[in-house]
């Protein structure tokens, strides 16, 4: 679990470092400029980190499933080599997805100006600058295909937690059930925050869309989850709880 938490922390750090420092510099210097190559790099790195984080959260759901439903097999199913392979698969999948997404996005001719109505280079706002509907729908088709992949991860997480809850409810003692739930609560909270903010950002109806709302929603899914994740997991630390109370 701590090995996966280390990878999650690195991904969170990467997500924030990709967007927030540039936005802060632009705000400080009262400018909104970013170079074309900088925009390409920002899209690639951010998409790579954010997608790898979702894949890693899927792996962590499997980790919690094995820990609670198959505790006697935990050492054999999730040994050091298996953990490294699964973490590498999450990072590699995010990298390949970002490479495909970035190459497809920036191969589209952009002729509707060069102003992205966002505090960082976000793919949907870049697509609004495309020259033709056919180019836009080509990238939108890739987004739909990608959505099915993420939907598969989401279904896997849901099925894992259904099995976990069924196993926990069979635990005879209340203390045992509380301990089992406490090991899953941080992960479940992080997944819920990540999914709800991301879904609302990309699936909100156009009728409620505005520049200010788009800015707030993008901030929620790109900055808030990575910033809050360490706090959520740290709340399991009794010493930290005592310090906060004081």
Image: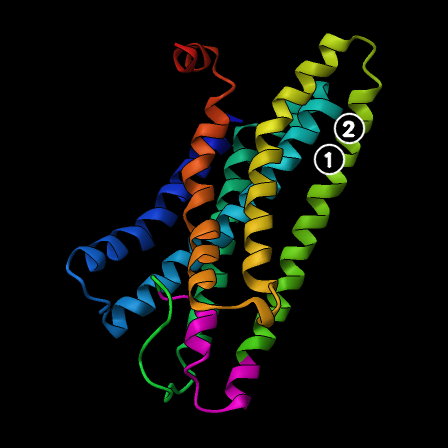
Query: Pointer 2 and pointer 1: residues touching (CB < 8 Å)?
Result: yes
Question: Residue 122: horizontal and vertical position, in percent?
Answer: 41, 66
Q: Which of 190 and 213 is in front in this view?
A: 213
Q: For the point 56% across and 42% down, which residue is it?
A: 193
SS assignment at label 1 = helix
SS assignment at label 2 = helix
Q: Residues within 10 Å of mark 1 (few under 14, many from 20)?
A: some
Question: Residue 176: horizontal and vertical position, in percent?
Answer: 73, 11
Question: Residue 168: horizontal and vertical position, in percent?
Answer: 78, 21
Is 228 situated left or right of 154 in this image? Answer: left
Residue stretch in magenta: 121-138
Whether residue 133 is in magenta: the answer is yes
Whether residue 144 is in magenta: the answer is no
Q: Eyeballing the image, is 184 above or below 96?
A: above
Is 63 situated left or right of 211 in this image? Answer: right
Q: For the point 41% across and 42% down, which residue is it?
A: 12
**Residue pointed to by mark 2:** 165
| Magenta residues, dominant SS class | helix
Residue 246, picture quadrant? top left
| C-alpha separation, residue under disc 2 versus residue under disc 1 | 6 Å
Q: Eyeballing the image, is 109 above or below 122?
A: below
**Residue 64: mark:** none
Question: Residue 17: horizontal and vertical position, in percent?
Answer: 31, 48
Q: Which of 100 and 223 is in front in this view?
A: 223
Q: For the point 42% across and 70% down, which residue is it?
A: 102
Quadrant location, the N terminus: top right
Q: Eyeballing the image, is 193 above or below 181?
A: below
Is 43 situated left or right of 192 in this image? Answer: left
Q: Nearer the viewer, residue 241 or 81?
A: 241
**Residue pointed to by mark 1:** 161
Q: Nearer the viewer, residue 164 or 192?
A: 192
Q: For the point 66% across and 36% down, which residue is it?
A: 62
């Amino acid at each position: 679990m701590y090995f996966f938490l280390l990878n999650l922390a690195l991904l969170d750090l990467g997500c924030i470092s990709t967007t927030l420092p540039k936005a802060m510099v632009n705000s400080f210097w009262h400018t909104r400029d970013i170079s074309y190559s900088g925009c390409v790099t920002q899209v690639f790195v951010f998409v790579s980190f954010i997608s790898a984080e979702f894949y890693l959260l899927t792996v962590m759901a499997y980790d919690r499933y094995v820990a609670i439903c198959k505790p006697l097999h935990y050492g054999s199913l999730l040994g050091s080599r298996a953990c490294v392979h699964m973490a590498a698969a999450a990072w590699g999948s995010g990298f390949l997805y970002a490479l495909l997404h970035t190459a497809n996005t920036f191969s589209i001719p952009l002729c509707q100006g060069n102003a992205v109505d966002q505090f960082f280079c976000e793919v949907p706002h870049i697509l609004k600058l495309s020259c033709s509907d056919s180019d836009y729908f080509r990238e939108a088709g890739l987004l739909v295909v990608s959505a099915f992949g993420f939907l598969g991860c989401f279904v896997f997480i849901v099925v894992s937690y259904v099995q976990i809850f069924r196993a926990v409810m069979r635990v005879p003692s209340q203390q045992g059930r509380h301990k089992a739930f406490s090991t899953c609560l941080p992960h479940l909270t992080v997944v819920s925050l990540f999914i709800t903010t991301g879904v609302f950002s990309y699936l909100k109806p156009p009728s409620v869309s505005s520049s200010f709302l788009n800015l707030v929603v993008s901030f929620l899914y790109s900055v808030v989850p990575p910033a809050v994740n360490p706090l959520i997991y740290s709340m399991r630390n009794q010493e930290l709880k005592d310090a906060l109370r004081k």
